Image (spheres, coloured by chain):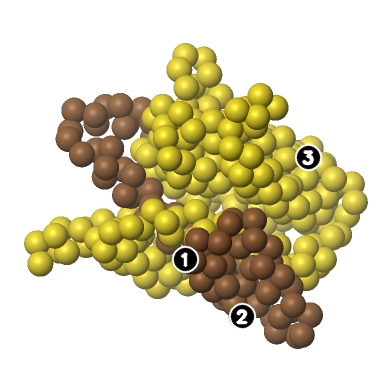
Chain colours: A yellow, B brown
Amino acid sequence: MKKLIRSNSSQLGFQILFVCLADALVGVSYGALAISLGFDLWVPLSLSILVLAGASEFLFIGIVASGGGAVTAAIAGLLVNSRLLAFGLSLNTQLGKGWRRFLGCHLMNDESVVFGISQPSSELNKKAYWLSGLGILVAWPLGVYFGAVLGEIIESTHALGLDVMFPAILIALVLPKLNSSTMRVTASTGAVLCVASTPFLPAGLPALLSLMGIFMKRVTSNG
Amino acid sequence: MDNQNILLGILVLALGSYSLRLAGPYLRQQLTRFPNIEVLSNELGQILLFSLAIATALFEANEFAGFARLMGFIVAAILAYKRVPLLIVILLAASTTALLRLLGVS
């Protein structure tokens, strides 16, 4: 990993380090939450390594803690993770070849996909994808472990405004990519669909509904 | 809580999530004979990420996440539009949200 950082612009390494740190901090609050809901350490820890997708893990823990069945909770989590299928459509060379591809797929998450499709070359895309993916594979479970050990720190991460980091990073990475009026129209339509449906649909589905924004492309190019 | 049941749930979620991760790139390879699939999937990706940015700025588990986070996000969006470096964008966004919460804004 050191080699990857050196051969890359320090800017990118810094960005990834920061995102991993932010993720670890979210992991701390997640670990603390799981323990406070009465789970043993192995539950959030194994979820964080094997599932490696924060939102679905929160949902799983939440449903089981409120008395729901574990399999029902898993299905709800899968619904949230259905966006991973859509993410995968925009990945190819980033994942590597042969056996590495199987690990590469496991590293797929919101952050690694953002980094993996926003670099200037496909070579840099691959480096950014793996560096952020491996970084999160380490940072997320570590955060969960420390959170479980340290207990309640949820309030303080909230007070520090760390919850705004993820949307802030997303918008900063995606805005420069919306460089045509067609892209701006399709993306805005997608966002409107997503936001308007969020209060009514289960978590994860609004993000998929946003993909319907692509149909605005035909409208704008014809008109 | 029944440990065996929880373990089963974790395995279902883990294997299912991994299958979803494998399916995307596989489908993409099957679709390469269609022209423009690269462009299309890239555009779909950007739409998804932009929508995710707006949605995570506004909501926390289907409910409004509060003005403090939203204001921090708006600061981030303006700075990002001005091409300010990412690190500064993140720090100023988090400071804005933290400061508003200190002042009593949710």
Q: Quadrant of the N terminus of chain A?
A: top right
Residue A73 in view, yes or no: no
Q: Residues within 10 Å of mark 2 (few under 14, many from 20)?
A: some
> In front: A101, or B84?
B84
Between the residue at mark 3 and the residue at mark 2, the CA separation in whole angstroms equals 31 Å
Between the residue at mark 2 and the residue at mark 1, the CA separation in whole angstroms equals 21 Å
> In front: B15, or A151?
A151
Query: Does A200 sit left or right of A159 as displayed?
Result: left
Mark whose residue sits in front, 3 or 1:
1
Mark whose residue sits in front, 2 or 1:
1
Q: Please tell me whether residue B38 is drawn above or below residue B87 in the rendered image.
A: above
Between the residue at mark 3 and the residue at mark 1, the CA separation in whole angstroms equals 34 Å
Residue on which the image places disc 2: B67
Residue on which the image places disc 3: A142
Q: Residues within 10 Å of mark 3 (few under 14, many from 20)?
A: many
Residue A193 coordinates in the image, percent (x, y): 35, 67
Q: Secondary structure at mark 2?
A: helix
Badge number at residue B81: 1
Question: Quick check: marks 3 and 2 in contact, CB under 8 Å?
Answer: no
